[in-house]
Image: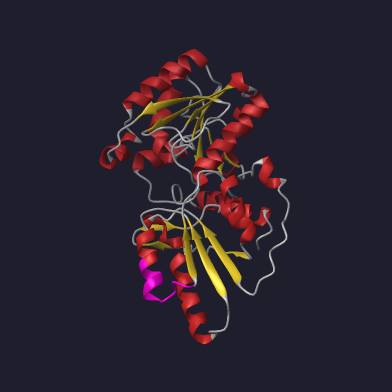
Amino acid sequence: MAPPSQPEPIQNSLTASQRLFFLQHASVFEHIGGAEYYIDDFVMMAHQVYGGESVRAIAPIQKDPLVTRPYQIQLVPRSEKAWIRKPQNRLFFALLKAASKSIEAFKPSLIVNSHVSFGPLAYYLSKKYDIPFATMVYGIDAWGNLWPQDEWCLRHASGIISISHWTKKILTDRGISDKKIQVVHPRLPEELEQAGIPERPQRDEVRFLTVSRLDAREQYKGHDHVLEAISILKKTKPNLKLKYIIQGDGTDRERLVTLANTLDLRDRVEFRPFVKTRKDLQASYQDADVFIMASRFGRWNGAWRGEGFGIVYVEAAAYGAP
């Protein structure tokens, strides 16, 4: 097995591996979002393919778990203070100690690191135990402007698991070999895939839906552009009946509520709260005539913006919402 300084292609690692150790930066146990669902689905897939005794996971947590899962995971308490949590991604000694102890007992064939910020931890564990490691990448986390140590560890990973061909292309454009990158698209839970396309109710109102985390750092998702478009339609086509439903919570919600009020859209916009599971979103998707998330891509204000994949588009399609 090649040492981390001479990365082994991920194809070889995954093909031969029967024991996977997941080093998770976040999880559905504490937060719900695209990355958390993707990681959970990936671990669930490994659990089904290799068996429960061949999969272990470890993740930081700061509050009571939201859900339970069939795979074995160790949750390590971390600080509730935001200014401590960020450096903990790279210098979380309690997680490192717990991961080391678990690896020594479990003896995995491959370490799967769920985020570039955990690259230094994954690289250290890889070197210490002579085990290859693969890093998951999504979008803005890996497109560029990484911390130097995170960039170095990403390039020295045995392999990279990309959520999309789009993210893979950006990485290869940055000089990372496409041979080391494997695309593993998100999957939908079976109950959602088998839900079928419902009949929309007959009404004279068109309903648009956006589902996302309302994070002030993710304003590229375009809620504000949709609100501005609806404001124009209200003025130019006053008889057009439509409603825009925004589902989600976060630090950007107050700004969007203020914008909707400023544009005099109280009668056209409905804010719905965050829900814990995909099943809880079923009614919203089935009730919507059109799913819309006018996401933008690019680099501005010194940072990359945009969707690495956009799982909600696929969820909406599964329920027949164009």
Residue name at image x 44 percent, y 47 percent:
141
Residue name at image x 54 percent, y 43 percent:
277
- Left or right of 282 on screen, residue 129: left
Q: Is residue 64 visible?
A: yes
Q: Position of residue 86 (x, y in %)?
A: 32, 40
Q: Position of residue 262 (x, y in %)?
A: 36, 74
| Quadrant of the image occupied by residue 12 | top right
Assess whether residue 263 is covered by the magenta stretch.
yes
Viewer-side residue, 184 vs 269 = 269
Compared with 307, 80 (above or below) is above
Assess whether residue 260 is covered by the magenta stretch.
yes
Q: Position of residue 101 (x, y in %)?
A: 42, 16
| Quadrant of the image occupied by residue 42 | top right
Q: State which quarter of the image contains the C terminus.
A: bottom right
Viewer-side residue, 140 vs 233 = 233
Rendered image coloring scheme: secondary structure
Viewer-side residue, 319 vs 45 = 319
Compared with 134, 225 (above or below) is below
Compared with 140, 41 (above or below) is above
Q: State which quarter of the image contains the N terminus.
A: top right
Residue name at image x 52 percent, y 86 percent:
236
Residue range highlighted in magenta: 258-267
Please give the count of numbered marks on the rendered protein.
0
The furthest residue to the bottom: 236
Q: Position of residue 298 (x, y in %)?
A: 45, 62
Q: Is residue 18 visible?
A: no
Viewer-side residue, 7 vs 250 = 250
Residue name at image x 45 percent, y 39 percent:
115
